[in-house]
């Protein structure tokens, strides 16, 4: 009886492992990672310590910039407000250190020669164009762009943008930024090629952050995510009936792929829909392909869109 129970248990484990193709053990992968809380060093250093800080991080202090500029920045009320808000939200950065360490382990798994960047946490005075900057061996993260979607400093930002200004999405942005320079994914000319290109990028991010839900990867609010879940079949029918899949109309990118408050079907329900619904569909096509085909992530990224679409056996959620 015990032998039978052992066989049953073993079979169950094997079946479970076979069903989950994304199960990857990174526990033995070692990464040498250090997150430098530069924002604390910059704003808290005493005057006599500031020269040493400049010497230790010279690339952050261009010699053309006078010390008076840095001193004004350190005493600027708006910058200090952002610094204190970041300190309140992030504290000792324990969550970020853990999440980024895990992320870099996945990068090392897929790219054994990947070099973990020296990482700086900073305050950028709400520079939304440079939330995350990756330059070879250096990574800069602007904490003031991840204070929480409802933070008072984002009141002038459109909600579909500030929805992503959260602690968890910080790690998503890091994954996407580094991926762009380490994984080459071929674009296409047709709409189906473009949405599968986006789908590959999103699937790659989720592969690097397997414990993050699709909603977090996409940056959708609960309402927008629910709309996408409930109307996937409607969206797909619209694409088919309007013969959009093999269209090369560039306007489709603005309507269904680029960040936007909603997608543009030119119908009454537009404002209820999430932006980038084409990317959402593309991610589901790629996920369906993975379910039906035994292929590595790197080979998936190199595969042409037409083959992925044809072999995906994609059926929209109804």
Image (spheres, rainbow, N blue to C red):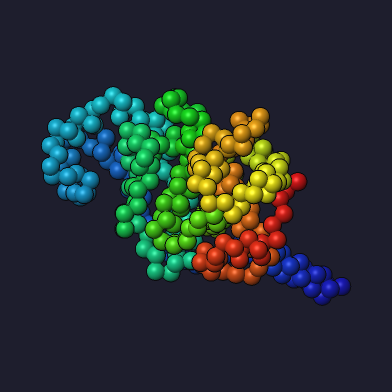
Residue at (25% x, 38% y) in the render: 42
Residue 286 placed where, x, y %? Answer: 61, 58
Please identify the residue farthest to the right as the structure is shown: 1
Q: Is residue 276 left or right of residue 50?
A: right
Q: Position of residue 100 (x, y in %)?
A: 45, 52
Reply above or below: 218 against 147: below
Can the viewer see residue 86 in this picture?
Answer: yes
Quadrant of the rendered image containing residue 32: bottom left
The front one of 238 and 303 is 238
Q: Is residue 89 at all visible to an observer of this figure?
A: no
Q: Position of residue 204 (x, y in %)?
A: 52, 57
Q: Residue at x 56, y 48 (%)?
A: 279
Where residue 246 appears, as percent x and y from the top left, is: 59, 54
The single residue placed furthest to the bottom in the displayed view is: 3
Left or right relative to 63: residue 253:
right
Residue toward you, 54 or 191 = 191
318 lies above or below 10: above
Foreground pick, 120 / 64? 64
């Amino acid at each position: 009886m015990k032998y039978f129970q052992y066989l049953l248990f073993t079979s169950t484990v094997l079946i479970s492992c076979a069903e989950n193709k994304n199960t990857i053990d990174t526990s033995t992968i070692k990464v040498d990672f250090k997150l430098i809380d530069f924002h604390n060093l910059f704003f808290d250093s005493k005057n006599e310590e500031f020269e040493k800080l400049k010497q230790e991080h010279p690339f952050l202090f261009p010699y053309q910039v006078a010390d008076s500029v840095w001193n004004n920045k350190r005493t600027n009320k708006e910058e200090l407000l952002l610094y204190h808000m970041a300190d309140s939200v992030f504290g000792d950065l324990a969550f970020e250190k853990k999440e980024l360490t895990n992320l870099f382990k996945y990068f090392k798994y897929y790219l054994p020669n990947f070099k973990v960047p020296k990482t700086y946490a900073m305050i950028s005075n709400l520079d939304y164009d440079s939330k995350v900057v990756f330059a070879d061996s250096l990574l800069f993260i602007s904490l003031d762009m991840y204070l929480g979607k409802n933070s008072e400093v984002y009141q002038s930002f459109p909600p579909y943008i500030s929805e992503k200004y959260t602690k968890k999405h910080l790690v998503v942005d890091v994954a996407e930024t580094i991926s762009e320079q380490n994984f080459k994914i071929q674009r296409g000319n047709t709409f189906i090629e473009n949405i599968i290109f986006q789908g590959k990028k999103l699937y790659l991010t989720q592969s690097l952050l397997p414990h993050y839900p699709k909603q977090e990867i996409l940056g959708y609010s609960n309402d927008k995510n629910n709309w996408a879940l409930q109307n996937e079949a409607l969206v797909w029918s619209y694409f088919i009936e309007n013969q959009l899949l093999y269209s090369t109309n560039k306007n489709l990118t603005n309507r269904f792929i680029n960040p936007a408050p909603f997608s543009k079907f030119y119908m009454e329900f537009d404002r209820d829909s999430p932006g980038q619904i084409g990317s959402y569909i593309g991610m589901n096509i790629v996920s369906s392909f993975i379910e039906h085909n035994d292929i590595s992530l790197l080979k998936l990224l190199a595969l042409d869109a037409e083959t992925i679409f044809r072999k995906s056996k994609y059926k929209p959620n109804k």
